[in-house]
Image (spheres, rainbow, N blue to C red):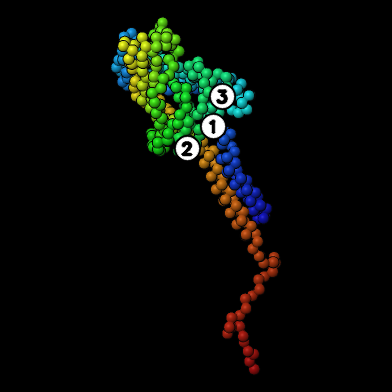
Amino acid sequence: MRRPASLVLLALAVFFTALSPLMRWYAFPRLAKIPPGQYQDMVLEARPATLLNYGTMKAERVPQVTIVQTLKGDVAASERIEQSAGRDVVVWNALSYVAGPDGKMVSAIPERYLFDAHSQEPVHATGEMVDGDPVRREGIEYKWPFLTEKRDYAYFDAQTRTTAPIHYRGTRTFHGLEVYYFEQTVPWTKVAFPKKMPVKGITPQSVEKMGTTRWYTTKRMFWVEPVTGAPVNGQEIHREELRGGQLLPGGGKVTAFAGHVKMRDDYVDSSVALVTSQRTLVLLLTRYLPWGFLALGAALLALSLHLEARGRRPRSPAGKAPAPAPPSSGEGVVSAGP
């Protein structure tokens, strides 16, 4: 029975050894993806901040400005685009809503973001936009790829509608997780006015006719968990100015918004908890199962070879007694006496 058993073990060893790279390089790229119907929200705050009072056209110090970001997956749009794109696509309808200390709207900028569910590369299709303006994104936004690398990435900035590198600045520990820290600085750039203005009767077109322009700069910082590619913390040192035109006394410039924007603590905690659970699933496909199958295959191979070696040992013929050992020198010889 040893030889059939060793052959079965050998077949299992080959199976699990072959399954190890298949799990990592075939199954993982196909199974790990962003679900099309995902919904998430995030609250960020600048405490304190500088905000423009449109009544006096002067910048004022305020205790708090709140930014609420929501991402909602459009399943129907994803399925429709997948038919022509030939791959899994996620469509996010995003909204960045900025509120002053009194809760009133400062700006509300919608986005429609399309990307590959596996690689997070942008997918170009009808409907891709920022604040109603058609765009063609290059690079990532909101999320890094699974198994993020220690390198710079191209990152899309929604305010300028342009893409620029976001730089890897080292590995850090954040709330017990090993994370990669990324940083991007957007220099002062002329940008469009939001379609929704905070004061009734004032529109982007009317402001532009008066010759006033809007300028923006930011230092963007992300702490990214590399296995899932999900940011667990994000901050911006953000500044906006209105410059020139008849809207400003003397045609100078005034700060429209300035502050150090940070994720609220409770949202940091929930992000860390969510990423920790998702991290285990990704590691199962990329590390635990592949290495476990490889170790199991090696153990089964060793056991198969052991059984095969034991089966090949010579054995005595059945029913025969073993031959007596030859006598040693000086023993077993007796002479016959007279």
Would you name the residue on which mark 1 appears?
119
Q: Amino acid at mark 1?
A: Ser
Left or right: 226 as drawn, with respect to 332: left
Q: Quadrant of residue 117?
A: top right
Q: Which mark is residue 124?
A: 3
* Dot 1 crowding, Cα within 10 Å, few <14, some 14–19, many 20+: some
SS label for mark 2: loop
SS label for mark 3: loop
Q: Quadrant of residue 307?
A: bottom right
- Residue 44: x, y in percent? 39, 22
Q: Amino acid at mark 3?
A: His
- Please tell me which residue is depicted at 61% across the width and 80% down the height of the picture: 327
- Residue 289: x, y in percent? 54, 41
Does residue 277 appear anywhere in the picture? no
Q: What is the C-alpha distance between the residues marked 3 and 2? A: 24 Å
Would you name the residue on which mark 2 appears?
149
